[in-house]
Image (tube, rainbow, N blue to C red):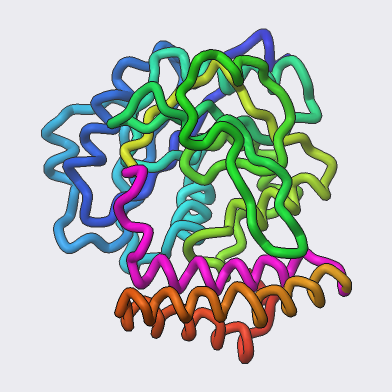
């Protein structure tokens, strides 16, 4: 029985030219109370091999795996899961810092309900530690492709202290039962970056599992609340994958309405905004993201 033992948890985190940030994560993980875990630092072909710096820190339970190429978020985490030994995979961003009971509190819902396939912690912004980034996800609007996180940007005053099912896992921090990856597959590698957790979540739910927001599990995310929103590559993948997600997961009517909404409202608004701000690089990548969907199939072997 799961409740009578301490199953091995494989903590999987990607590193790409952020060895100092990764070491800060590993240092925080030294405070974890859960006794049975391994940490796999999956390096995505960084300019500098992070192994010497990580070995210098003498972080326990830690192995560095070096990929010969940058596989992206989706394929990189899949690569890590294939090499992991654990009964559970804890997929977590390297720009986070953990709390001591995080693993225990993420594992507990699996013990209580075998239908649960994924658990996610409450996520706070590291530099604004009383502000929520994630307390679950609201249901995606299948006519616009838009989604909002529960509690995003709210001050945490205990309003989301009740755990429960949610519509999708957050790619920043999610614990996945190995059985789920074996039965529902892993991250869709076609996405590379952004929306991949939504597509995987949709398949996990269709496979009959629950995705659970664990309110008593807390992690801090160093992502800025404002910086990076206009990054051209982020514009490209958000645009490309928002459309791709809808192509893969909506029915005919939903896709028709979404297409009309995007072509006649979302795209013109974005184009006018980028032109008005003279953000020509962002505009180029927005158009490239749209165009990609015209010639690329929505499904592939991975």
Residue 8 locus on image (x, y percent): 53, 25
Determine the main secondary structure of the stretch shown in magenta.
Answer: helix
Q: Per the image, is 138 magenta? A: no
Q: Residue furthest toward the bottom?
A: 295
Residue at (44% x, 35% y) in the render: 11
Quadrant housing the C terminus: bottom right
- Can you see residue 239? yes
In this rendering, the answer to whether 128 lies above or below 247 is: above
User: Closest to the observer: 231 or 189?
Assistant: 231
Quadrant housing the N terminus: top right
- Can you see residue 87? no
Residue at (37% x, 32% y) in the render: 125
Residue 62 locus on image (x, y percent): 31, 33
Q: Per the image, is 239 magenta? A: yes
User: Closest to the observer: 203 or 291?
Assistant: 291
In this rendering, the answer to whether 142 lies above or below 182 is: below
Residue at (60% x, 73% y) in the render: 266
Residue 267 locus on image (x, y percent): 57, 78
Stretch in magenta: 224-252
Rendering quarter of residue 7: top right
């Amino acid at each position: 029985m799961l409740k009578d033992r301490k199953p091995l948890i494989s903590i999987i985190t990607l590193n790409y030219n952020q060895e100092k940030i990764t070491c800060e994560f590993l240092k925080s993980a030294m405070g974890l109370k859960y006794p049975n875990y391994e940490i796999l630092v999956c390096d995505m072909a960084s300019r500098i091999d992070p192994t010497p710096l990580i070995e210098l820190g003498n972080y326990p339970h830690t192995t560095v795996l070096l990929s010969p190429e940058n596989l992206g978020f989706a394929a990189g985490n899949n690569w890590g899961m294939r090499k992991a030994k654990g009964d559970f995979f804890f997929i977590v961003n390297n720009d986070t810092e953990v709390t001591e009971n995080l693993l225990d509190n993420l594992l507990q819902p699996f013990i209580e309900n075998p239908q649960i396939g994924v658990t996610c912690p409450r996520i706070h912004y590291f530099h604004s530690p009383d502000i929520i980034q994630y307390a679950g996800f609201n249901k995606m609007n299948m006519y616009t492709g838009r989604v909002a996180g529960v509690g995003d940007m709210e001050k945490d005053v205990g309003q989301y202290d009740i755990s429960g099912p949610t519509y999708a896992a957050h790619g920043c921090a999610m614990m996945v039962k190995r059985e789920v990856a074996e039965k529902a597959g892993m991250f869709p590698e076609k996405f590379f970056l952004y929306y991949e957790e939504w597509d995987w979540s949709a398949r996990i739910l269709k496979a009959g599992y629950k995705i659970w927001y664990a309110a008593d599990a807390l992690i801090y995310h160093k992502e800025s609340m404002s910086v990076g929103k206009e990054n051209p590559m982020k514009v490209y993948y958000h645009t490309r994958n928002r459309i791709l997600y809808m192509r893969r997961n909506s029915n005919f009517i939903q896709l028709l309405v979404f297409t009309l909404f995007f072509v006649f409202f979302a795209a013109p608004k974005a184009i006018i905004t980028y032109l008005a701000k003279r953000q020509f690089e962002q505009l180029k990548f927005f158009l490239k993201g749209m165009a990609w969907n015209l010639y690329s199939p929505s499904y592939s072997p991975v």
